[in-house]
Image (cartoon, grey):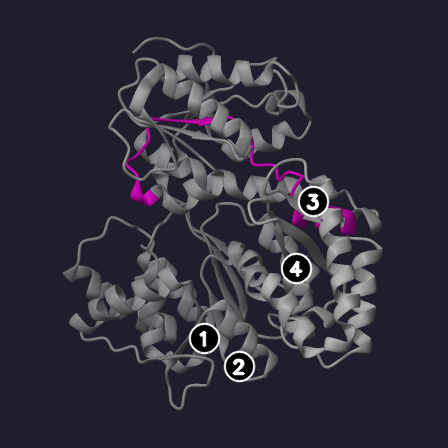
Amino acid sequence: MLEAQAHHRLKTLLRQEESDWPHHLTLSRLVGRSLRRRDTSLLQLPPSSGERWWLGVLVPLCLNPGAAAIVLTPAQRKWLLQLELPRLKEQGLQLPCWQGPTPPPGHQLWILDTDELIEVHQNNLLGERQLLIPDADQLSDRLRRSLAIRIDHNDWERLRQAHPVMDQALLDLHERLSRQVFQEAARADDCIRLQGGACQSLRDLLHLIEPCPEPWTALLATDPVQWAEWAELDHRLLQWTWQLEPLEPLQLLSGLLKNRPVLMLSESGECSRIEHELSQANVSITVKATLREQELEEPLPLYAPRRQPLPNTEVYAQHLLEQSRRLILGRTGLTIVLVDDQQLRRQLTSALAAEFGRRVVEESTAPESNGVISAHWDWWLEHHEQVPAPEQLIVALLPIASLSSPLTASRVERLKRRGEDWFRTLLLPEALSLIPGAIAPLRRAGGRLAVLDGRLRGRSWGDQVLKQLEPWRPLQRLLPD
């Protein structure tokens, strides 16, 4: 069987290499089994496994390279081609690879990015290949960015030049939309949702003057019910860019994962988000397996006082500063402060810098040994491997998406129209999926976690966040080292 052969080859390879990751053999057998049975599998890896999973995936593919197409980010593709393939070659293993949107001519592993995946799917070129998707929990976001439509000032000019008879009508509509978005802006360079009569009037006009140059043809092909639309403002030039993204790309690309063998890997530590997205796209998971690490099972010291103020109160910013100051004072290791609200993060960073000087930086991968990094959750999840292990992590705000985001607001409205619980269906699962990966480096380093968001104790759903943090032990008070 494929899994037994992969197990034997990998075991021989591991005797010649040193690795502290205990899941290579188990993962290779699961991958080999999925390739042989051609099922839909979701393999949940330990949070923040880094690039240690490659061997367990690639060795079975060396034995049957033409069975799959793998969907990679540019960084993952570079890692595979420059590090993993030479590593396999040194051990006598060959993995022929083919890149680009045209099908491989032979028995080769097909490497695709999300743009190419969409093109290949729409042209029905995947054939019988099984899709292999690392970071499956990020698939929807990556597909959404690939499907995005962007219309700027130059696109309006090209449209006017293509239809000079409609020049004045197009100018009037552009002026009407410009006046609307700049009047609604609450701050410089804001993002304003586009909705109402002006957008529909433009669509009606475009239908009358077809054909249109790109990206206007792509705009006409969109269903406003399934897409979010907003304007990104540039107050310096008094211009704006029309941005469109699909609300649920897996549902829009019907058939991409349905009735096709798919092997998905997730490092988030929480699969409820991807499972919900797959169920909405009518994709059934045949096999689900979870790999665990013993070092991630040690109780995490958690400082989360009761009766903390809620983020929407006037006293919260001061509470956050005072508690962060106490937590940072006297620490000799690295501190990470996570807060997605840009205005609050800058305010907190400035205040902490006034207290602790150049130790405090914003989203930097080169901090001092006792430095303080303030960052978005997404930045930390993407860059934590490039940063020294933290001694403590301060959660200033839980990663609940804000309704001020036009995309989030549109997705919420869609669920409201369907009568669903939009918070527990959308916002809470997506927030919970970020937590295990964010705290995994802290667990490995033996650090402590502080949650200063009053919603953890003040909202009923806070218990789900605490469950996601398990195992943990409470720190009732801050004591000097």
Q: Tag 3: residue type? A: Phe
- State the image coordinates of residue 50 (x, y, percent, origin top left): 34, 50
Q: Is residue 190 left or right of residue 447?
A: right
For label 4, the crowd category at 10 Å Cα-Cα, with few meaning under 14, some 14 to 19 and many 20 or more, is many
Q: What residue sits right under mark 4 in the picture? A: 244
Q: Is residue 435 left or right of residue 29?
A: right
Q: Tag 1: residue type? A: Ala
- What residue do we see at 44% from left, 76% from top? 68
First of labels 2, 3 by sequence position: 2
What is the distance, in whole Å, between disc 3 and disc 1 at their CAs? 45 Å
For label 2, the crowd category at 10 Å Cα-Cα, with few meaning under 14, some 14 to 19 and many 20 or more, is many
Above or below for 262 versus 453: below
Q: What residue sits right under mark 3 in the picture? A: 182
What is the distance, in whole Å, between disc 4 and disc 3 at their CAs? 18 Å
First of labels 1, 4 by sequence position: 1
Above or below for 203 versus 277: below
Q: Which mark is residue 126?
A: 2
Circles 2 and 1, Cβ within 8 Å, touching? The answer is yes
Q: What residue sits right under mark 1 in the picture? A: 69
- Select label 2 or label 4 by which is in front: 4
First of labels 2, 1 by sequence position: 1
Name the secondary structure under disc 3: helix
- Select label 1 or label 4 by which is in front: 4
Above or below for 233 versus 302: below
Name the secondary structure under disc 4: strand
The quarter holding residue 399 reads top right
The residue range painted magenta reads 385-414
